[in-house]
Image (cartoon, grey):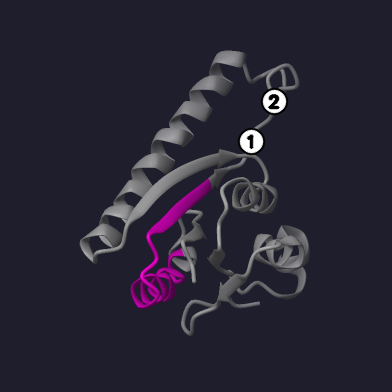
Amino acid sequence: MYKSILVPLDGSQLAECALEHVKAIATGCQVPEVVLLQVVEPIGRPGYLPAEVSEQAYRDAKETAEIQSRNYLSKVADGLKEEGIAARVDIAYGLPADEILDYADRNGVDLIVMSTHGRAGITRWVFGSAAERVVRHSINPVLIVTPRGCRVSK
C-alpha cells in the first residue's frame, strides 16, 4: 500500500516520537523507502540581510546548518537501517509546512508521518503548527503522532 513514507524531523525528541509508528508501519507494510526530512529555516535572504550579517556569514550559517542536519538525519537513518528499514535523508530550506508539502508532492510520497509538539493556547498561536498546516493542505494521507509523555505543557 505504501511505497514511500515521509518523516519530517526537526531535531527534537518530540519529533522523534513518531519514529516508533514509522517503524511499525514500514515493517508491517513492507515499505521500500522511508525518507527523513529536515527543513532548515532561513535566517534571511542574501541581499535582504540585516547590515550586521554579511553574505559570507549567511553562507557559513547555511552550510553549518546543512552539515548539522545531515549528521543528525544520518544518525537516525542508521538506527532505522539497523532494524531493517530502508531509510534515506534529505534537507529542504524554507518554512517547514510549505517545504514538507512541496517535498511530498514532488517526490510521490504515499504517507506523511509526523509528530506534533502538543502546543496549545498562546504558544500554539505564537509558534503556529507545522503539523496542523500539513494536515489541512496535504493531498497525501498524514498520520499525526502525539505520544503519551511527549506532550509539551500549556
Q: Which element type, helix, strand or loop, lies under badge 2?
A: loop
Task: Choose top left, top right, bottom left or bottom right for residue 47.
Answer: top right
Reading the image, the residue beneath label 2 is 45
- Within 10 Å of disc 1 (Cα), the crowding (few <14, some 14-19, many 20+) is few
Outermost bottom residue: 148
Amino acid at dot 1:
Pro
Q: Horizontal placement of 56 versus 18: left or right?
A: right
- Within 10 Å of disc 2 (Cα), the crowding (few <14, some 14-19, many 20+) is few
Q: Looking at the image, which is closer to me, 127 or 100?
A: 100
Q: Which element type, helix, strand or loop, lies under badge 1?
A: loop
> Do the residues under discs 2 and 1 have CB atoms within 8 angstroms?
yes
Height in image: 50 above or below 151?
above
Residue 124 percent across, percent down from the top left:
72, 67
Q: Which residues are magenta?
A: 16-38
Which mark identifies residue 42?
1
Please name the residue shown 68% across and 45% down the image: 95
Residue 122 percent across, percent down from the top left:
76, 69
Please name the residue shown 42% across and 58% down the image: 34
